[in-house]
Structure formats: structure tokens, C-alpha cells
Amino acid sequence: MPPSGRRVKLGSALFNADHARLGDELKRVEDAGVDFIHLDVFDGYAVPDQGFPARTIAALRPLTRLPFEVHLTANDPLRFLPALADAGVDLIFLPAETTPLLYEAIYALGERDVRAGVCLALGTHLEVLAPVLPMIDAVLLLGRVTGEGKRGRDFNDLILRRVSEVRAMIDACPIDSHQIDPRPIDLQAAGGLETASCVEVCRRGATSLPLGSALHREPDPVPYLRHLRHLLDAIT
């Protein structure tokens, strides 16, 4: 369960929006009341897609004051960091599987005033978080293989135990003495989330949900978000 009194944040995974109308889609979800914008950046190799290039993110940045976070999936993620920081990204999830010198990469983001997160795929051992957890602002746990949704695969229940385990790790995490203004570590779950799975991952301790097709397929996202918030508020 999320920390007492902490409301679950709901975001838009903009990759699922109509890419011919990104500006309009961004305004639509902002007006509906989402808390943040989640942007996928792929390299075309680790995942057979390229998501949003940094120049597209930079073009979207002036259109909203909502926080921008990036889920980065790349075989060489470090080369993307300068351009993403310059594009105005607030938080970058580094892929645990392909980021060499993870500690150093997190530190480099801090030097650019970009918040750091770590993303873990379903098959990645959670122990990779232990050395860096006090340094980061967020953890993203994937509920399916990135890009798997195109093949019709749904949310994978294997993530539920992982959310519980990371929630326990976060709750036991000591504060890094180097943090001037320590903030709670955000725990996100993503990938094939529908209403029931949103509720379940938040029962296990997730504190933010980037919503993809479940949000963007709605002609009017306002009733959907209102209903989901009602369900989530009941468990926090």
C-alpha cells in the first residue's frame, strides 16, 4: 500500500496518443487532470522502435507545465542523456540492464539537475537497486516486455510481487546524507495497466502510474480518471 496520506499520481504515457496530433493530445490529458507526462525514448535496437526523439520532446516542452519523465530503453543509454536534459526533461529512468556504471550515470544526471530513476524489466533481479536506491528519485517496474503490447500481450501478474518487494526496499532505505532536500522515492508500475491492475499494483505499494492505451483510447478521459482516482483514493 502507498505511504499513508500520499495520493497516487496518474500520468499520460504519450507514446499511446495520436502522434499526428501530439500537441492536442497533450492538452487533452492535461485538461483531464493528469499529474505528469511519461515519454518513451527507444534506440531502435534494444526495442524495435524509436519512441520520441529529443527534438520532439523539446518541441512539446513549452506546451505544458506538467513534469516530463522519460523511460529510456537503449543499448547505449548514456549518449542520450545530454540531449534529453537539454530538451527539458525532469526525470529520466535509466535502464538497469544496459546502463554501465549505474552509480556514475545517476550522479551525472544530478549534475545536470535532472532527477534520476531506474527502470527494471520483468526478468531483472531487484538486487541491482540496493547500491543506488538512496541516490534515486524513482523506480519503474515494467509489467511486460517493452513493445510486447504490439503482439497482444497483456499485463503480467509477475509484477505484483516485485512491487511489494521494492516497496519494502524503499521503506527500509536510509536517506542519502548527500541529499540536501530528501524526497520520497516514487514507485511506478507500467505496461498493460487496466483499471483492476492499477488498483492492485497500488495496493502493493505503487505511488505513480503512467497510463497508456487505457487512458488514450478514451474519447473523454475525464470520467475515466475520475473513476480511477476514486478507486485509488479508497486504498491510500
Image: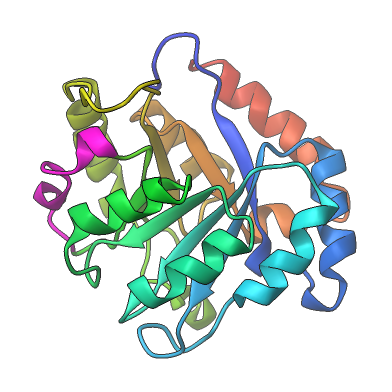
Q: Position of residue 181 (x, y in %)?
A: 40, 20
Which residue is depicted at the point 24% across and 61% down? 96
The residue lying toward the viewer, choosing from 59 and 213, is 59
Q: Is residue 8 above or below residue 85?
A: above
Q: Is residue 193 above or below residue 188?
A: below
User: Is 74 left or right of 25, judged from the image as shown?
Assistant: left
- Most extreme residue toward the top is 5
Q: Is residue 96 above or below residue 162?
A: below
Q: Position of residue 100 (x, y in %)?
A: 19, 69
The image quarter in which residue 166 lies: top left
The image quarter in which residue 23 lies: bottom right
User: Is 64 left or right of 6, judged from the image as shown?
Assistant: right
Q: Position of residue 17 (x, y in %)?
A: 74, 66
Which residue is depicted at the point 77% across and 67% down? 59
Q: Is residue 32 above or below residue 97?
A: above
Report the span colored magenta.
Answer: 124-135
User: Is 133 one of the magenta-colored residues?
Assistant: yes
The quarter in which the N terminus is drawn is top left
The residue lying toward the viewer, choosing from 195 and 186, is 186
The residue lying toward the viewer, choosing from 8 and 74, is 74
User: Is 98 one of the magenta-colored residues?
Assistant: no
Q: Position of residue 121 (x, y in %)?
A: 28, 63
User: Is 45 left or right of 100, judged from the image as shown?
Assistant: right
**Can the viewer see residue 157?**
no
Which residue is depicted at the point 48% across and 82% down? 151
Numbered label tally: 0
